[in-house]
Amino acid sequence: MAAILHEAAQLLGDPYPRDRDQRWDRLLVSSGRDSKELKRIFKNAENFYLGFQEATLTLPFDTLNHLFWDCLLYTSRCV
């Protein structure tokens, strides 16, 4: 599980940003989307959080989340 958490943290760079606003900024940068695309996403989103979710869909957090929970629930499956 530590390896999965480490991989998720590495997506935000080194050192890992402790400040929430800095983490959010790094997530948007890490998404690979340009500023024009991000503006469009946030403009069309119902709210900030849904916009943020859509903007970061390019990142592998869903996969890492599933790996983490599989590891937690089925310890024998841990990588």
Image (cartoon, rainbow, N blue to C red):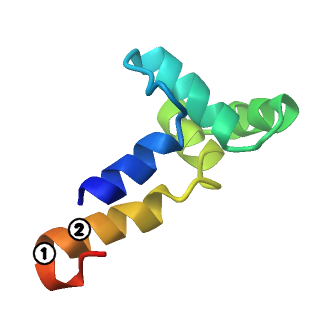
Closest to the observer, 66 or 54: 66
Q: Which residue is mark 2?
A: 69
The circle drawn on residue 73 is: 1
Q: Is residue 10 above or below residue 57?
A: above
Q: Is residue 49 above or below residue 72?
A: above
Can residue 74 be seen here? The reply is: no
Where's residue 46, x and y in %?
A: 57, 38
Closest to the observer, 6 or 67: 6
The quadrant the N terminus occupies is: bottom left
Can residue 66 be seen here? The reply is: yes
Tag 2 and tag 1, C-beta contact below 8 Å: yes
Q: Amino acid at mark 1?
A: Leu
The residue furthest bottom is: 76
Where's residue 71, x and y in %?
A: 21, 72
Where's residue 77, x and y in %?
A: 23, 83
Closest to the observer, 24 or 9: 9
Where's residue 52, x and y in %?
A: 56, 37
The residue furthest right is: 36
Q: Amino acid at mark 2?
A: Trp
Q: Residue at x 75, y 44 (%)?
A: 32
* Quadrant of residue 17 within the rendered picture: top left
Q: Residue at x 33, y 70 (%)?
A: 67
Q: Residue at x 65, y 55 (%)?
A: 58
